[in-house]
Amino acid sequence: MKGYDGGVRTSLLSIIVCPDCRQSIKLVQGDPSSVDKNEVVNGMLECLGCGRSFVIRRRIPQLLPKHLAAAQQQEMEARDEQVEEYDSNIPLMLFGLVEMPFTFNQLDLNSSQSLLEAGCGTGRMSEKLAKQVKSLVSVDFSLKSLMENEIKLEASGLKNFHLIQADLCNLPLKDGLFDRALSCQVLEHIPTDELRKKALSEISRTVKPGSTVVISAYQYSRFTKDKEGEHDGGIPYFRFTEEELTELLAASFTLNSVSGLLVYLYVAQCIRPEVPVSDTAAQVSPPPRY
C-alpha cells in the first residue's frame, strides 16, 4: 500500500480494516446515491476475517470496536448529547481564530497531501482542512457529531473527505496511509495513560514514515485549577505538564517542538520516525520549546 490519494467515496473501502481483527472489509449491501453512483449513502460492510458486520449511515461507516472502556462509552454518549451546545460555544469559536492558523502552520499543508483528522467532532476544523489538502479522513466516536460535520461539509460542496465513526485507540485504517495527521484537544479526554499511549501509537501507525503529526492537549500550570476531572456530562480531562506530554509523545514519535503559546494548550509538532520508536534504544531528550 503506497498511501491514500483520495478519490470517489467508495475509495474508502481500499483503506479501512476491521477495528477488532485488522482484516479487510467488503461492501455487502448499499444504496448508491442518486447524484453520484460512486457513493454509498446507507449500507452494510462485512469483515473478511471475523465476519463482523458494520453499518454505513449517511455515508459514515460505523467502525467502532466491540469493546470500549466505560469512560469512553460515557464520553461518547455525552458528546452525542452536546452537539448543539458545542457548536454554539462562543469562547471556543473565538479561540479558534488564533488556534487554527497557529496549528495549521505547524502542519505545513498543501494540495497534494492526504490528512488524517483524529477526533473531528462536529467539524470545527474539518472544512478548513479539506480545502487545503487533496484528501481528508476525519474520525470521531460521536456519531451525532459526525452527522453534523457531514452536513457542513456537504453544504460546502467539498467531495475530498471521508467521515468514519471510530475509536482512536483502535483505528480501522491500514498502515502508512497519510502524509499528515492532526489531533486537536482530544488527547486530554482519553481516560487513562495506557489508552493515551495506544491512541498515539495508532495515529503513528497510520501515517507514512517521515510524516508530520501535530497534537494539541490541555496545558497544566499554576494558573489552572485541577490537574484532572470531568466536564459536564462525564467527559474526562487530564492537563499535562510539558514533561508529561513530551514523555508520552516520545513513545510514538520524534518530537520537533512543543509550544505553550496558546496559553491553555500545548501544541506539539512530531515526526513519525522511519524506524518505530519502540525499536530504538535512544534516550528521550526534550524538544525545543518556544
Image (cartoon, grey):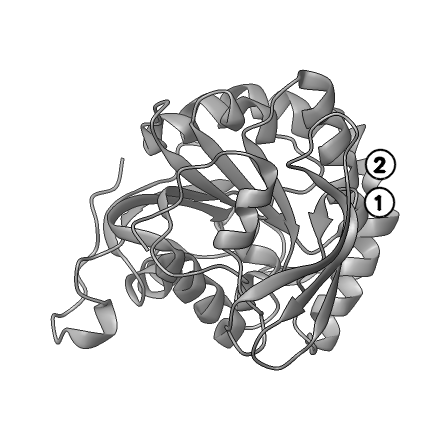
Q: Residues within 10 Å of mark 1 (few under 14, many from 20)?
A: some
Locate residue 120, reporting x and y percent. 61, 42
Residue 82, numbered circle: 1
Q: Which residue ends up furthest to the bottom in the rendered image? A: 50
Spatial CA distance of label 2 from label 1 is 5 Å
Rendered residue at 44%/22% (across/down): 132
Q: Is residue 129 above or below residue 117?
A: above
Query: Decide: marks 2, 1 in contact (CB < 8 A)?
Result: yes
* Amino acid on which disc 1 is placed: Gln
Percent position of residue 263, x then y: 48, 35
Q: Which mark, by number, is residue 85? A: 2
Q: Residue at x 62, y 68 (%)?
A: 191
Q: Can residue 27 be seen in this view?
A: yes
Q: Which amino acid does label 2 sit on?
A: Glu
Image coordinates of residue 109 in percent, x first then y, are 35, 27
Nearer to me, 284 or 173 = 173
- The residue sitting at the left extreme is 282
Q: Which residue is drawn at 59% across and 31% down?
A: 126
- The spot of residue 266 in percent (x, y) is 43, 43
Q: In which quarter of the image is the C terminus?
A: top left
Residue 94 position (above or below residue 86): above
